[in-house]
């Protein structure tokens, strides 16, 4: 069965939902899932609608004929075919837990993306990536060659048609220029503690302070390093009985889960930028289904 979705952002006003519902009904489409949010602080309205075109309406046709509705309400909108897999480039350094988790999820169909490239500044995961029939690119980064290395990275992104870059524990800071060029299309993952620890070996610092919660945050990348709009977060509880190495292992697991959920939300068009924040709608029924279990 064909499934499409429509995403809409506009200034809040009366009649938006009615106009969208009427349009879809008039074009033979049946709504299967719908989420909306009216931000009363910013005056912005956000909506995501999943639907089936029961009378064979094509995306191009729907897009063209929706134009009068969008103009009336000043909407920014997009129609998506939910069967189309987003093209993703993954960047990784020497911590491979997130990369391996994503490779597995993609292999079993739990994450509907096409990994078109893995880029690393080290060779550690070349064999793992190549064995998965994915192109591997080792682009070394030093203080001296950073502009050239980043240009090489962007060349891979452009040549592969990657729509999203995932920083799966990529331990290099991206330039402001790259962050701006790929705004809203780079997702990062990092640990988060209360209190916060930065610098070398944050897990050891957390252990020495007796931290009881280890968390992870996945967000869009901006020029402000780890200050981009947050997509997904989670925590795992720690007790006094855990060792410093337990902290690392537990943190590794929560990072992998949080990053996968953030990517899942993005590729299903459930994330809307709302200033420095995001609106993240719940997953549609069936969107977590996988093709196989192993």
Image (cartoon, rainbow, N blue to C red):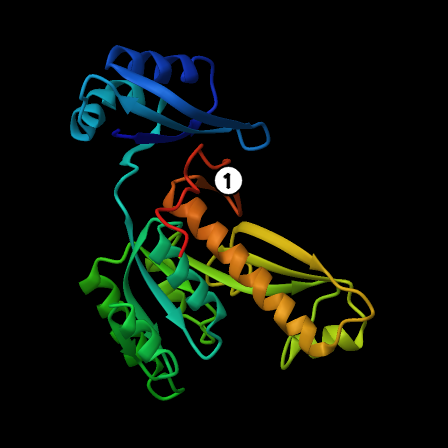
For this rendering, which residue is in front, 38 or 137?
A: 137
Q: Residue at x 34, y 75 (%)?
A: 128
Q: Residue at x 41, y 39 (%)?
A: 287
Q: Residue at x 47, y 37 (%)?
A: 283
The image quadrant that residue 72 belongs to is top left
Residue 292 in the image, given as x and y percentages of width and height = 37, 50
Give left or right: position of 219 versus 185.
right
Decide: is 231 above or below 47: below
Decide: is 112 above or below 56: below
For this rendering, which residue is in front, 157 or 129?
A: 129
Residue 17 in the image, given as x and y percentages of width and height = 42, 17
Neighbour class for label 1 at 10 Å: few (<14), some, many (≥20)?
many
User: How many numbered marks, from 0 up?
Assistant: 1
Quadrant including the N terminus: top left
Quadrant including the C terminus: bottom left
Mark 1 — residue? 280
Q: Residue at x 36, y 15 (%)?
A: 21
Give left or right: position of 164 versus 41.
left
Decide: is 122 above or below 97: below
Decide: is 222 above or below 278: below
């Amino acid at each position: 069965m064909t499934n499409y979705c429509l995403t809409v952002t506009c200034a809040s006003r009366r009649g938006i939902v009615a106009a969208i519902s009427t349009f879809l009904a008039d074009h033979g489409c049946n709504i299967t899932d719908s989420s909306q949010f009216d931000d009363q602080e910013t005056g912005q309205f956000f909506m995501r609608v999943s639907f089936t075109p029961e009378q064979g309406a094509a995306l191009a046709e729907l897009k063209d004929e929706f134009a009068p509705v969008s103009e009336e309400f000043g909407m920014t909108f997009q129609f998506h075919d939910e069967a189309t897999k987003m093209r993703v480039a993954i960047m990784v350094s020497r911590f491979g837990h997130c990369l391996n988790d994503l490779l597995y999820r993609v292999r079993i169909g739990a994450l509907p993306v096409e990994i078109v490239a893995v880029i690393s500044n080290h060779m550690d995961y070349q064999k793992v990536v190549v064995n998965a029939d994915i192109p591997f690119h080792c682009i070394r980064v030093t203080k001296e060659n950073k502009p050239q290395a980043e240009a090489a990275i962007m060349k891979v992104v452009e040549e592969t048609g990657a729509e999203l870059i995932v920083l799966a524990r990529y331990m290099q800071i991206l330039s402001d220029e790259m962050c701006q060029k790929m705004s809203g299309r780079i997702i990062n993952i990092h640990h988060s503690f209360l209190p916060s620890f930065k610098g070398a070996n944050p897990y050891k610092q957390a252990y020495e302070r007796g931290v009881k919660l280890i968390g992870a945050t996945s967000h869009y990348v901006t020029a402000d390093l780890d200050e981009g709009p947050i997509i997904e977060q989670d925590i795992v509880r720690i007790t006094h009985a855990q060792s410093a190495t337990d902290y690392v292992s537990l943190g590794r697991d929560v990072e992998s889960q949080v990053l996968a959920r953030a990517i899942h939300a993005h590729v299903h068009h459930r994330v809307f930028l709302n200033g420095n924040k995001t609106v993240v709608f719940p997953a549609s029924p069936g969107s977590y289904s996988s093709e196989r279990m192993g």
